[in-house]
Image: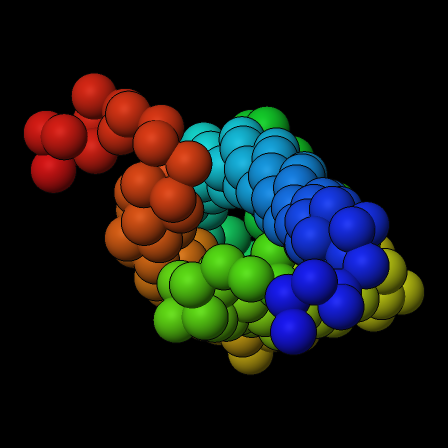
Amino acid sequence: MRDLLPVWLPRAAIEALLIVFAVVLGFLVNEWRADRAAETRANLALTRIVGEMRDNLEALETAAEYHAQIVENLTAIEAEVQSGELPSSANLFETVMPAMPMGISPPILSDVAWEYAGQTGALDQLDFEIMSEVARLYSVQELGTETTWKMIIDAFFFNEESFEIREISAKLSFMRLSFTELVSQERSLIFTYRSVIPQVEALVGIEPAAEDVGE
């Protein structure tokens, strides 16, 4: 029976196996390269996001401290209006500007790195729970502090009534409460940033900052 087999058959079988092996190996190498490229993109995206979050955190810490001072200053002005030291019928804008020595000063918070990473799909394969925390953080940032800022600006600084002589007691109280709410939102967001940043850093092996270690 063996003598009936063509002499070339064993060699052809070996060559066929080698071809199959090469094809499979090629697929595995391509898949490995694709995985490495995806991992590199994800790490780069995470590094940019960490940088963005740290910049946002720094801006929030500065803003929250300043806005807390504004609340104290507005409280003092409100007390002076109630006691009669300042007139209750006045130009609101001129009355409150001494409470804001550096102007309104909203924090400049970015979401460019996060949005770009989401659009490119660079984070699709990463830990879902951590990415959900990051997504929630950016959502709170947009719907919380940024929305409150727009409300404050529209209600008090892009409003003609604020530049006219009017009874200001009620609006002054409303302004103080609005800044109080803003400070509360900023401090809550600061707490969330401080919690989330180390988790994202761990995904790319970034050493936590000294202040994070201290905390």
Q: Quadrant of residue 73?
A: top left
Q: Position of residue 65 (x, y in %)?
A: 37, 39
Q: Residue at x 21, y 21 (%)?
A: 210
Residue ranking furthest to the bottom: 170
Q: Is residue 96 above or below residue 169?
A: above
Q: Is residue 151 above or below residue 54?
A: below
Q: Is residue 144 visible?
A: yes
Q: Is residue 111 left or right of residue 177?
A: right
Which corner quadrant holds the C terminus?
top left
- Which residue is nearer to you in this view: 155 or 26? 26
- Which residue is nearer to you in this view: 14 or 76? 14
- Which residue is nearer to you in this view: 143 or 150? 143
Q: Is residue 180 left or right of residue 40?
A: left
Q: Position of residue 41 (x, y in %)?
A: 66, 39
Q: Residue at x 21, y 27 (%)?
A: 211
Q: Is residue 15 left or right of residue 131?
A: right
Q: Residue at x 70, y 62 (%)?
A: 3
